[in-house]
Amino acid sequence: MATANLPLHIASQYLLGYRRFLLKNPDQVEAIGHCPCCASSFREWRPVFGRGRKAECHICHSFERHRHLWLTIDADSGFFQPGTSLLHFAPEPFFKKAFGENPNIKYYDCDLAKERATYQVDITSIPFEDEHFDRIICSHVLEHVPDDRKGMRELRRVLKKGGIAYVMVPSQARPDTYEDPTINTPELRLKHYGQATHVRIYSRDNFVERLQESGFEVEMQLPKAKYGEDICRDFLLGDNVYICR
């Protein structure tokens, strides 16, 4: 399991939580699913609240996209080097804990909503100088941003030469990105895009094109192509990672 880059005290907390969970839920001992984030194993995943699927880790609460991203980051030899500066948009609890409590990382967690992160930041106007960050994580953010191209250019601007931005969005194998400025109410967005705060449905290829237009070299990493059917099934990995340099 890919827990070597977790701070020791966090890995220990997850291990203790896992043992307690199995004591309370002995029927889960027969493991089918395995979480690479916290090294826990279960007979079945926890239901995701309001989503109608079983995909959440019982211990670290990761989803499919978090597990795919964690495996990708864990393989990045430069990510956990002392002094690494990391800009993280919309920080998920697992990652915020793993990065924010890692002494090697200069961690900047940010969100448009000030109560969700340390720094209140609009992705289309990032208040840091050019080439400031070694790594950037921006997962499931740009589909909410009306001027996503401006946000992409800002990510490119603040990324150091030789740095990497890990970007994720919901995307589909469709001819083009579906967006319409007249779809401008929560009700309409829910009907057309599947979520009330989304402003588009990305085409995979078009999303790559937009990132490239912003100055990135882009590798689209599909979980099954990267890890194979068995690992994707056992770890329940999901969503593509767009690796931007």
Image: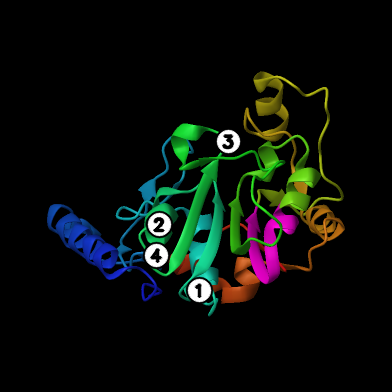
95 or 153, nearer to the observer: 153
- Label 3: element kind: loop
Say which quarter of the image contains residue 42. bottom left
Q: Nearer the viewer, mark 4 or mark 1?
A: 4
> Mark 2 Cα within 10 Å, few/some/many (few <14, many 20+)?
some
Q: Main secondary structure of the magenta part?
A: strand
- Read off the residue under disc 4: 37
Side of 17 relative to 139 (left or right): left
Q: Which residue type does callout 1 highlight?
A: Asp
Which is nearer the N-term, disc 2 or disc 4? Answer: 4
The foreground one among 210 and 108 is 108
Residue drawn 40% across the image and 57% down it: 100
Q: Is residue 149 visible?
A: yes
Can you identify the residue that label 3 sits on?
A: 112
The residue that disc 1 covers is: 230
Q: Amino acid at mark 4?
A: Cys
> Mark 2 and 1 residues: CB-CB less than 8 Å, in contact?
no
> Which residues fall within the magenta stretch?
155-168
- Density class for disc 1 (Cα within 10 Å; few <14, some 14-19, many ≥20) is few
Who comes first in sequence, dot 4 or dot 3?
4
- Looking at the image, residue 102 sits to the left or right of residue 86; the answer is left
Residue 85: image quadrant is: bottom right
Amino acid type of the residue that numbered disc 3 sits on in the rendered structure: Leu
